[in-house]
Amino acid sequence: MTFYEELQLNQAGSKSYISSFKNSRDKWKHTGIYLFKILLNIAFCTAFIAVYSMLFGAENSVVGLAVLLCVMVFRSADLGIRASHGTCNILIVFALLAAGPKLSNMLPAGWAFCINAIFIMLFMVLGCHNVIMFNHSTLVLAYLLLQGYDVIGEAFERRLAGLFAGAVMTAAVYYRNHRKKVYKRTFKSIFQEFDLSSARTQWQLRFTLTISSALFLASLLHLPKTMWIGIAAMSVCVPFRKDMAERTKYRAPGNILGSILFLAAYFLLPESALSYMGIMGGIGTGLSASYGWQTAFNAFSSLALAVPVFGLPFAVFLRIFHNLFGSLYAWLFERLFQPALSALISVMDAVSNKLQTT
């Protein structure tokens, strides 16, 4: 394996590769490459978001994060359709990111639920035809972040400019990397293959209604930082029940552990270190191969941003409560949704058969 190929491995892949060496010298060598990769990724991500903040305003740094996530995902993940059609898909997705979060924040809870459901479903259909790619987590996370960090006036105009630049950048990277792949499927095929009887469509629908209804319920309860509930529900709402149970099991404990580690760092380190909590969390996430530990270290950057707004005690409480609420809600919704959908499909089939015989 070349140095470049080793840099492309994910956490689990890198750790597996390191453990394959028997010689301690080789283990240390490739551990060093792994650590270098983590630091390189963090440096690049920090620089990218910093440049976006300078160009489009500090309040739009979240746009830089959303664009960065999309570029990193779609440089390797294709959409399973012709490259030119996939490129158009990317542009449509960014148009949805520009409109959806703003619309949902302008409307009452009931109408916001409808907007969230429509836009999230479009993300699922347009960007997550191949379930294994997990593109949905990137697109819906970007949607929730833009929704949670809303802006108005000139800042929103700069946000639109940032999203336009991100759309062009992501589309260019996507087309460059996937133009040589040959697919017969087209943009139209995505919608033609939408079928309530298929496991993929059922999961897309369940995912959409889980996130939308969780946000709706949080709005009715007037909970602050509802974005965290949506992200927690999104994180555990995966296609397979076994994987979902595993993620639900570790989501809240991971955030409790992350909050404890954050508190320790907060009190032991100087006050100026708070601005570096996100980087510390990024390093921890990079070193973690398991979902539980990744969840714990992801809490660092979230809490660092929330503490100045809510204060330390309430920020920690919200982080734990919202993740517990979101993950358990998604788990319960799945248990109720599947039997209800199966019953609905049975009724629809019975009605269809009766109409055909008459």
Image: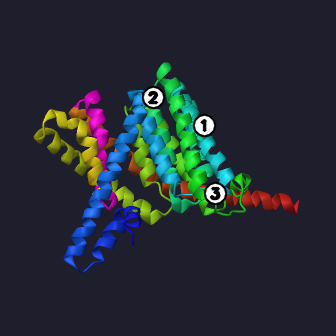
Q: Position of residue 94 (x, y in %)?
A: 57, 39
Q: Are marks 3 and 2 in contact (CB under 8 Å)?
A: no
Q: Is residue 22 left or right of residue 130?
A: left
Q: Secondary structure at mark 3?
A: loop
Is residue 110 among what the camera can see? Answer: no
Q: Is 306 inside the magenta-drawn segment?
A: yes
Q: Position of residue 291 (x, y in %)?
A: 34, 59
Q: How is the image coloured?
A: rainbow
Q: CA distance from mark 1 to mark 3?
A: 22 Å
Query: On the rendered image, what quadrant is the N terminus found in?
Result: bottom left
| Range drawn in magenta | 288-311
Of the two numbered discs 1 and 3 on the same chain, state the one appearing first in sequence.
1
Residue wearing tag 2: 56
Q: Is 108 inside the magenta-drawn segment?
A: no
Q: Amino acid at mark 3?
A: Arg
Which residue lies most toward the right here?
Answer: 358
Crowding around mark 1 (Cα neighbors within 10 Å: few <14, some 14 to 19, many 20+) is some
Of the two numbered discs 2 and 1 on the same chain, state the one appearing first in sequence.
2
Q: Amino acid at mark 1?
A: Ala
Q: Name the disc covering residue 179, or none.
A: 3
